[in-house]
Amino acid sequence: MSSYTTGELCRGKGAVVNEMKITLPSLSRNEGIARAMVAVFCAQADPSTTELADIKCAVSEAVTNCIVHAYRDTIGTIGLKVQILEGRWIRIEIKDSGCGIEDVRRAREPLYTTDAAGERSGMGFTVMESFCDGVHVKAAQGRGCTVTLCKRLRDRNFRT
Ligand SMILES: Nc1ncnc2c1ncn2[C@@H]1O[C@H](COP(=O)(O)OP(=O)(O)OP(=O)(O)O)[C@@H](O)[C@H]1O
Ligand SMILES: [Mg+2]
């Protein structure tokens, strides 16, 4: 098992105010559906358009990784859990039971990719980290991968 954390996670930030759990098969069309469903759920927390775009982009990268890497040419299940916490924190967990990652620290390095076809740029984890306040990744070879994205929405009254 390997894991890494960057930035600030939601642990201990406050009680869960609302929660959504969904599972989807790893069909490529479900990337857009997952992204849209997360956005609709998060909209109740009154994010700015930029914050909502950031969340959608980060979720899109994590879900795409489940589709293209975790299950490759097979179809498996993607689990999504979205929580709104007190203090305007959003916590999103994206979980698969696919091939897993041996070394998540190496996988998160910018430009690192195992894609041999040259279609991937190895920037997915970098994008997730730049659009969120905290990212936690836990994986084990052959035992799937769980990505947790944490984002703090700015106070409505102090937004620029
Ligand atoms: N859910 C996952 N299951 C298995 N391996 C994964 C998973 N997510 C990421 N990886 C591995 O980590 C590597 C880096 O992921 P990252 O998203 O940063 O880049 P990429 O998917 O290769 O390219 P890009 O996201 O830019 O299209 C992947 O190439 C893959 O080997
Ligand atoms: Mg990727």
Image: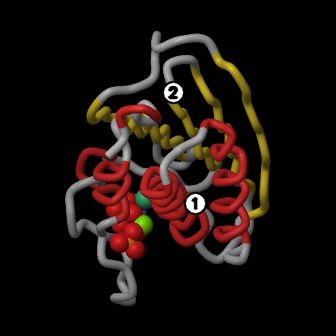
Residue 72 found in image quarter: bottom right
Residue located 41% across and 40% down the image:
137
The spot of residue 31 in percent (x, y) is 65, 68
Q: Nearer the viewer, residue 140 or 62?
A: 62
How packed mark 2 is, by other alpha carbons closer than 10 Å (few <14, some 14-19, many 20 or more), is some
How packed mark 1 is, by other alpha carbons closer than 10 Å (few <14, some 14-19, many 20 or more), is many
Residue position for label 2 = 88
Gap between marks 2 and 1 measured at Cα: 23 Å
In the rendering, which numbered label is found on residue 45? none
Q: Is residue 18 left or right of 70 when viewed as pictured?
A: right
Q: Nearer the viewer, residue 22 or 35?
A: 35
The spot of residue 87 in percent (x, y) is 49, 19
Q: Judging from the image, what secondary structure is the residue with disc 1 in?
A: helix
The spot of residue 99 in percent (x, y) is 55, 56
Here the colouring is secondary structure
Q: Nearer the viewer, residue 73 or 59?
A: 59
Given the image, on which type of amino acid does mark 1 rest? Val
Q: Judging from the image, what secondary structure is the residue with disc 2 in?
A: loop
Would you say the residues marked 2 and 1 are in contact, meaning their CB atoms lie under 8 Å apart? no
